[in-house]
Image (tube, helix red, strand yellow):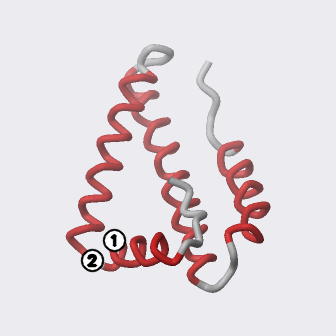
Amino acid sequence: MTGLNDHPEVLGYHRMVFTTPALAARVFRYMALDEEALAVALTEVTDDLTARLVAGQVLTVQRVLARRNWQVLVEGETAERAHPAAVAAADHAFALLPAIG
């Protein structure tokens, strides 16, 4: 999920999910499950603690970027015009993450 979809129904869906406490809590639960799955996969290339730390960082980057993209669209920007800045932000954000090697 990138948050970079300006279709009115998608924007309405995001608004509903992120402004309804029970739905927002469920989204965070699914994100926790995603983080766990990524951590398990990363244990094939690194130790458990490093895998969990990196998984948390990756999922946090995704969440922050998607939320930022959604906010830009809610403020009236189109997905097409927002796309270059969103790609640059993603490149910057993921470059800040540590490499696992």
| Residue 26 position in % (x across, y down) | 24, 59
| Residue 51 position in % (x across, y down) | 44, 28
Q: Residues within 10 Å of mark 2 (few under 14, many from 20)?
A: few
- Does residue 25 appear left or right of residue 73 in this picture? left
| Residue 90 position in % (x across, y down) | 68, 52
**Residue that mark 2 sits on:** 20
Q: Residue furthest top?
A: 44
Q: How many marks?
A: 2
Q: Nearer the viewer, residue 48 or 20?
A: 20
**Residue that mark 1 sits on:** 17
Instruction: In the rendered view, tell whether residue 33 sits above or below residue 4.
Output: above
* Residue drawn at point x = 79 percent, y = 61 percent: 84
Q: Are marks 2 and 1 in contact (CB under 8 Å)?
A: yes
**Rendered-image quadrant of the C terminus:** top right
Mark 2 secondary-structure assignment: loop
Q: Amino acid at mark 1?
A: Val
* Residue drawn at point x = 66 percent, y = 51 percent: 93
- Does residue 52 appear left or right of residue 84 in this picture? left
Q: Residues within 10 Å of mark 1 (few under 14, many from 20)?
A: some
- Does residue 101 appear left or right of residue 14 in this picture? right
* Residue drawn at point x = 38 percent, y = 40 percent: 35
Instruction: In the rendered view, tell whether residue 95 sits above or below residue 39.
Output: below
**Quarter residue 27 falls in:** bottom left
Instruction: In the rendered view, tell whether residue 1 sits above or below residue 47.
Output: below
* Residue drawn at point x = 46 percent, y = 28 percent: 50
| Residue 22 position in % (x across, y down) | 20, 70
Label 2 to label 1: alpha-carbon separation: 5 Å
Q: Nearer the viewer, residue 78 or 98?
A: 78
Q: Nearer the viewer, residue 67 or 9?
A: 9
